Structures are given as structure tokens and as C-alpha cells.
Image (tube, helix red, strand yellow):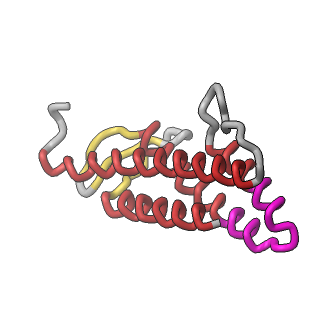
Amino acid sequence: MSDYAPEDAALLCAVGRLVCAWTMLEQSLEAKVAMMREAMGDVRTVGARTRPGMTKLMTELRTMVSMRDRRNAGALMEIADIERDMQRIDRFRSLIIGGFQQPAPGGFTCRDARNNQTHVSLEQLEAEIASLERVAQRLLAV
């Protein structure tokens, strides 16, 4: 911890914001799925014993939307687009969480799954957080 300079505070804060934004997206999606289930007459809780992951939640959402909008494939196409964006953001999030190495000028270094060193700037991190927030808005509007 002593290697972190005061100017790294914004960077470390942004890493925390990325993690929190993803968790908030999962919780919002879980609430949306529960609300849709209730509206369709099913009152059981989603994932009664364990908290469902993003994949399970997206599968349930896709299933319920297809039942709700049998003749309108537009919502399913939007969900597919959102899923692609979420997968990209999740790969970035995994790089940050699993591969964070150390602060570097203008950002920090990470190592990906293949052990390649990557530089992530604060601007990249901020852009991914904004992208995640847009994805969340699009997803909850479906």
C-alpha cells in the first residue's frame, strides 16, 4: 500500500466504481426478473438458495421477454446486443479485478489470462464505467 501515491486515489476510486456498477447492474437485473415473474403470475423468488449469476439472469430475462413479446423480435435483438456489450465489459472488469498489477503513469498495469501486460488508463476505466451505466439503462428498459 505504501507504493500508492496520492494521485492514484482517483484511479483506485474508479476501480471501485467499476466493481460497484457491475454489482448494481446484477441487483437491478435480478429485481427486474422478479418483477416480470410476478407480473406473469409466478411469485417464486429467483435463486432462492444462492444468488443467480449474470448468465442465469440474462437467460431468464430472454425467456420471459420471448413469452411476453411472441411476435416482436425487436426486444430479443436488443437483449442480444446488450449481452455482447456486457460480455466485453465483463472481460474488461475481469482484467481489472484479476490482473491488476500496479499503478503506472497515467493509469495502471494489468496482466491478462495469457500473462500479457496491458496498460489501462484512467480514461479507459471511466469510459467502461460509463458504458456499463448505459448498458444498465438499456437493459432495464427492455
Image position, residue 96 (x, y; %): 43, 45
Looking at the image, the residue that sits furthest to the right is 71
Q: Choose top left, top right, bottom left or bottom right for residue 125.
A: bottom left
In the shown orientation, is residue 38 left or right of residue 110? right
Image position, residue 128 (x, y; %): 44, 60
Question: Residue shown at 76%/66% (left/top)?
Answer: 76
User: Does 83 appear above or below 134?
Assistant: above
Tell which of 56 and 98 is nearer to you.
56
Find the magenta span and give its range: 62-81
Q: How many marks?
A: 0
Looking at the image, the residue that sits furthest to the left is 6
In the shown orientation, is residue 119 left or right of residue 40? left
Question: Residue shown at 54%/47% (left/top)?
Answer: 26
Image position, residue 16 (x, y; %): 34, 45
Magenta span has 8? no
In the shown orientation, is residue 137 left or right of residue 42? left
In the shown orientation, is residue 40 left or right of residue 126? right
Tell which of 7 and 38 is nearer to you.
38
Tell which of 102 and 128 is nearer to you.
128
Question: Residue shown at 60%/46% (left/top)?
Answer: 30
User: Does 11 appear above or below 2?
Assistant: below
Q: Would you say the magenta stretch is mainly helix, strand or loop?
A: helix
